[in-house]
Image (cartoon, rainbow, N blue to C red):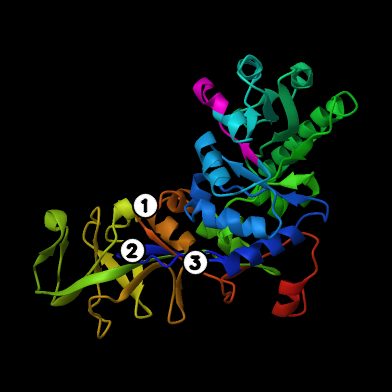
Amino acid sequence: METYEKKGRAWKELNLGHLRNNVRELKQMVPPDCRLMPAVKADAYGHGAVPVARELARMGIRDFCVASVDEGIQLRTAGIRGQILVLGYTPKECLPELAAYGLTQTVVDGAYAEMLAGGPGRFRVQAAVDTGMHRLGFSWTEPERILALWRQPNLAVTGVFSHLCVSDEDTEDARRFTLEQGRRYRQVLDCLYGKAKSRFQTHLLGSYGILRYPELAFDAVRPGILLYGVHSSEADARRQERPAALYPVLSLKARIACVREVEAGEGVGYGLAFHSNGKKRIAVASAGYADGIPRALSGKGHALVRGVRAPVVGRICMDQLFLDVSKIPGVCAGDEAVFIGESLGQRIRAEEMAQAAGTITNELLSRLGKRLGTRVVAERSEPIYNIKIPGRKEACAPCCQRNA
């Protein structure tokens, strides 16, 4: 197993033991013959596509989802085999790379199908079906246009899939619409079965679909944010209960560069946006918005320093930010500031950080800076929260949950 030990000024820490745990838990949420097809797009939601995909491959995962041809090439050149499905649009000039790297392209609509059919080489494709989101895909009312893909000699159709748009919402209207999307998708499949010239893979569910609509699982599911042990929002995390334990894979940390004494009435940082109401000890942490810490957290965020919460004060800079460590004894240069993760038994979760910044974890994590170092560890700790799975009995003890 490769080891990444780069820390430097600011870094992310990946716990592959937690990733392995999450894979096992997600497999228990779907039927035994349903495969995981993880979404490792956006650099695996900021975690690092290569180390994440390599660990998933070691666990037997053979299907991956990315957003672009470049993301697919990155995995191929890192030695990832199996199917890599490009979920997004690939322009005409990049079509040769699809074939050269053995990537599978989503057919986004009829016009795109014609472009692929007239392109150079032979392409593996999967057809997207628009069942109500109105983003990408053939309309669910026109299955014959999907069937026509099998008549194109240079297209090898490997799958037909759709995407849910309100499975993360906890309302009766959202549930009704999600079930209607499932009905429309099944109707399309019923029209294709027996007429298509080859077998094809079917998949509909992402993370929240897996949680709330396991009855809509088909050949595969596409876990995204939950694969990384994170909910999209703090409210979602609070709504979930036992028994399936998910473990956050990522921590975000930085070094304290220096600690300064600030007298009452003095200002700190750009615009002198923070004025001390008394004598303060201000630590400068070596991370800023270029590292993925949103500027919106200025005056609102926190970091853990020596196991104690230190508030962010003043405006967050591109490369540094300020922490009030007046109530934390002994803070000095070289100490760790933990923005996501654990320090001496205290935790800050990605959901909490995202809420304070007015966004969701999907955006927060996928915007982590490219210059962050990466450290990979393999151990597993206690879960930060548990997830309720419809129809699954609660295990008798945490060890039973992990080994079930």
Could you say which disc has been placed on residue 369 in the image? 1
Whole-percent x, y for residue 23 in the image? 67, 60
Q: Against 398, is 155 above or below?
A: above
Q: Secondary structure at mark 1?
A: loop
Which three-letter amino acid code belongs to the residue tagged 2? Ala
Label 3 CA crowd tier, 10 Å (few <14, some 14–19, many 20+)? few
Name the kind of residue labelled 1 in the image.
Answer: Gly
Determine the image quadrant of residue 201: top right
Q: Was residue 90 drawn as part of the magenta stretch in this picture?
A: yes
The crowd level at tag 2 (other Cα within 10 Å; few <14, some 14-19, many 20+) is many
The residue beneath circle 3 is: 3
Amino acid at the residue labelled 3: Thr
> Where, by quadrant of the figure, is residue 317 drawn?
bottom left
Q: List the residue tagged with mark 2.
A: 10
Front label number (1 vs 3) = 3
Q: Earlier in the sequence, mark 1 or mark 3?
A: 3
Q: Are marks 1 and 3 in contact (CB under 8 Å)?
A: no
